[in-house]
Amino acid sequence: MPDAVVIGAGPNGLVAANLLADAGWTVEVLEAQPEPGGAVRSDRGVHPDYVSDLFSAFYPLAAASPVLARLRLHEYGLRWSHAPAVLAHPLADGRCAVLERRAADTVAGLEEFATGDGAAWQGLCDVWHRLGPDILGALFTPFPPVRSGVRLAARLRGAGGLRLARTMVLPVRRLGEEEFRGEAGRLLLAGNALHADLAPEAAGSGGFGWLMSMLGQSHGFPVPTGGAGEFTAALVRRLKDRGGAVRCGERVVEVVVRAGRAVAVRTAGGETVPAGKAVLADVAVPDLYGGLVDVRHLPGRFVRDLRGFQWDFATFKVDWALDGRVPWTAEQASTAGTVHLADGVDGLTRFAAQIAMGQVPDRPFALFGQMTTADATRSPAGTESAWAYTHVPHVVKGDAGDDGLTGAWDEREREAMADRVEAQVERYAPGFRSRIRARRVLAPPTLQAMNANLHGGAINGGTAAMHQQLVFRPVPGTGRPETPVEGLYLASAGAHPGGGVHGAPGANAARAALRARSVRGVLTRGQRVLSRRDRSGEREGPG
């Protein structure tokens, strides 16, 4: 019997399993898909000469994560690679906002857009240098973050805490307007905010855009050399080196609960796998509660709160094998691993508003990845392994474009939407389509079929909006990995701090399980001592 069963071999599940194995627990990881990795996988499915990342691709949070740093995955083969520039946002007139690897270069570029904007960017960087480590420490620990929180509060008192707090809750449109006179700085912040489902006018989008921008400035947007799957492979090798097991093709259909405690899991094949100490679920929130765990084991208030759980935007993705580099009008875009494509901040607002109204956007904001630019091993010299994703509504009420898209995502709709994404790229890179050797289209249902946690292609485990973060994630009053079922821990992006490849939900769940067993062991030993005293006629208590 393993000490722990981990449901799901995504990055959070594998991080949790590794930490439990480090503590001497026996661990078995059960994964429904034929291979491990969750949303961190790669293949050669577009073209045999090209490595394509199936889901996630760039990993600033992984590079910054103290959780992953402590795993020392470089000892298990993980290598990171960087594009010459971190991020670019080309404009229609040929200019380009660029987040460079060196802050001084970013500052110089922004200064060309408007005098003083370089100094404004440097000011944002200075705040990050003072507070960034404690912000990350608070972000990557269970809520409330006691130690990091105390240090952060102390530093905030000396850094104009209330003013900074105001900055963090600002909508990113307003933050950009207050900090920058020109377009470039505003675009870098706003585009990064749209990495989550945060519209430019949403409260807190300024803080998220600043966080992602500063992570890019300090750590870059690195990629695993050889493909995203190499990140997963390193986690699996490390786990197996410590005696852990990963079983793929084993879909868990039930968490077995007895007397209020998780004691086993049951697979689709009918096997019952007992868990001696804990079950950790790297599973989407709605699939765990009321799915794997029957509602009769959950408090009524908790079940009612789950009705308010909100997914982040649905995702539509296209992968390409290009026989040449992307012919950007703005040449600086050719140096960046990630390129944002939208008609300014107004274009981002228009895009988010269309999704909010249930419309498929007519000019989709596209995050475009140039993987060979970031890692030369991804395709033959002179070519590019590329992808782009955009967002669409979960429930489509209409099409803002001319294709009559309904959200059925049949072959006609998939191809029409892929053409729409390509048209957006073509606006900034005329001739792009002539360089396409092959393409693969991943509509929301396809993404979900490849990874059940990506409900409708939702990639963050639930909205990043303020009403479902911190103590509100996944429902009000939580914010920690413990669940209403003893011995069951939420280890997915549905738990604080949410989406992104950083391992924090898995690490938090593992530490909670270890802590609970430690406390339980102390109590059990205490009970044995008291029992012996009772039997020997000694009275309880001091004296």
Image (spheres, rainbow, N blue to C red):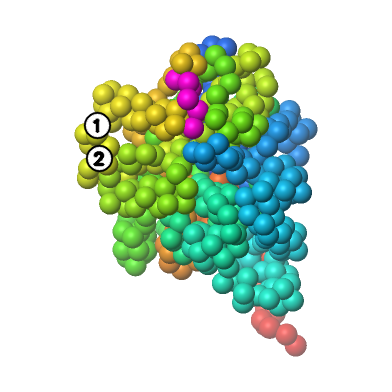
Residue at label 2? 399
Query: Is 224 situated left or right of 9 in this image?
Result: right
- The relative height of residue 434 versus residue 503 in the rendered view (above or below) is above
* Residue 147, magenta (yes or no): no
Q: Is residue 394 visible?
A: no
Question: Residue 402's image quarter?
Answer: top left
Q: Are marks 1 and 2 in contact (CB under 8 Å)?
A: yes
Query: Is 519 situated left or right of 204 in this image?
Result: right
Residue 459, position as x, y percentages in the image: 46, 42
Q: Helix or strand or loop: what does disc 1 sit on?
A: loop
Residues rendered magenta in the picture: 428-433
Residue type highlighted by circle 2 = Asp
- The relative height of residue 358 versus residue 83 in the rendered view (above or below) is below
Residue 194, position as x, y percentages in the image: 48, 49
Tell me the distance, in whole angstroms, between the alpha carbons under discs 1 and 2: 7 Å
Q: Nearer the viewer, residue 340 or 396?
A: 340
The count of marks equals: 2
Question: Residue 141's image quarter?
Answer: bottom right
Residue 158, position as x, y percentages in the image: 74, 76
Residue type highlighted by circle 1 = Asp
- The relative height of residue 109 versus residue 520 in the rendered view (above or below) is above
Residue at label 1? 403
Outermost residue, bottom side: 543
Instruction: Name which residue lies at 58% across and 29% down.
Output: 370
Q: Nearer the viewer, residue 523 or 23?
A: 23
